[in-house]
Amino acid sequence: VTATTIGRVYGSANPDFAEGDWVLGLNALEDYSVVRPGGFTSKIDISMVPRPTLFLSGMGAVGLTAYFGLLDGLKPQSGETLLVSGAAGAVGSIVGQIGKIKGCRVIGIAGGPEKCARLTRDYGFDAAIDYRGKSARHLAVEIGAAAPEGVDMIFENVGGDVLDAGLMTLAMRARILLCGLISEYNSADGKHGARNLWALIVKRATMQGFLIMDYVDQFATGGQQVAHWMGAGKIRVDEDIQTGLENAYPAFMRLFSGANTGKLILQIAT
Ligand SMILES: NC(=O)c1ccc[n+]([C@@H]2O[C@H](COP(=O)([O-])OP(=O)(O)OC[C@H]3O[C@@H](n4cnc5c(N)ncnc54)[C@H](OP(=O)(O)O)[C@@H]3O)[C@@H](O)[C@H]2O)c1
């Protein structure tokens, strides 16, 4: 399993990297990694931040997925309605908070009453909807009640019934960003797919895919902006830190049971 990592240089044949330097990378879950600089792999200055893990969460790929996905992918305008799925998760919670900074009405979909309470209480969402145990049609009715004029944008992290429900509630010329389809990653009976694509035709809507790797050369700029919002108290970033390489499997599975609250991080070294 490859993941975004932060770690310290143990030994280096490159004069730009000294022993003890902190480095961001894209590596396996392992005690030691052999890497070359460039692309994702770069030095980080942890004196800039209250805790180094922020380079994995708010200022890392997660926060920057929210930042670039929302601002460049969906281009929100003040007064528009934004629907976020996987809303209490690492990416989704930051998407919703940036949506509020941009003046949008933000509706989040998450699993269970506690996560829904966190959406409005901790992240400032305008409305929260619990998807568990509900059909796409049932969910669409609840989204429609929270967005009587329809949703202008969907930031999609989940797919399946949740996406189908969102598609039933689109406003005219809505935009949909496919960031993730987590409900389909482990599906044993094939892909569910989006069954309500007809809505794109009726509403003249646009759906596009998004991959954070396209923005690597803009990470520093995006990271500074997210850090500024965090420092100003406008964005709250939660982390779910599990420990020990031997716990990698149960830790990873927290993503699929929904047990994680915030960016899931596995701490291997101390
Ligand atoms: N495109 C990109 O470049 C990019 C980059 C980073 C992440 N992503 C995607 O963004 C999404 C969120 O990632 P994250 O790291 O922020 O994870 P996360 O949201 O912190 O954790 C995953 C959450 O997904 C929800 N979930 C899991 N299985 C589900 C299912 N079957 N149906 C509905 N919800 C389910 C759970 O929340 P509930 O308890 O609410 O169900 C779980 O807590 C993922 O789809 C990921 O692949 C994409």
Image (cartoon, rainbow, N blue to C red):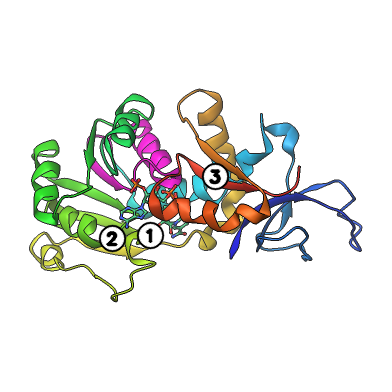
Q: Is residue 98 left or right of residue 56?
A: left
Residue 33 magenta-highlighted: no
Query: Residue 28: x and y, percent?
Result: 66, 64
Contact, mark 1 vs mark 3 (Cβ under 8 Å): no
> Which three-letter amino acid code belongs to the residue tagged 1?
Gly
Q: Is mark 1 within 8 Å of ligand 1?
A: yes
User: Disc 2 beta carbon < 8 A from ligand 1?
Assistant: yes
Q: Is residue 103 visible?
A: no
Q: What's drawn in magenta, residue-wise?
A: 78-105
Quadrant occupied by the N terminus? bottom right
Per the image, label 2 sits on a secondary structure element best described as loop
Task: Indicate the amino acid at tag 3.
Answer: Gly
Q: Is residue 183 left or right of residue 80?
A: right
Where is residue 14? Give x, y as percent.
89, 61
Callout 1 secondary element:
loop
Query: For the residues marked 1 and 3, what is the alpha-carbon distance in whole angstroms?
Result: 20 Å
80, 186: nearer the viewer: 186
* Residue 222's disc number: 3
Residue at 29% x, 76% y is 190
On the image, numbered disc 2 is attached to which residue? 159
Q: Amino acid at mark 2?
A: Gly
Residue position for label 1 = 180
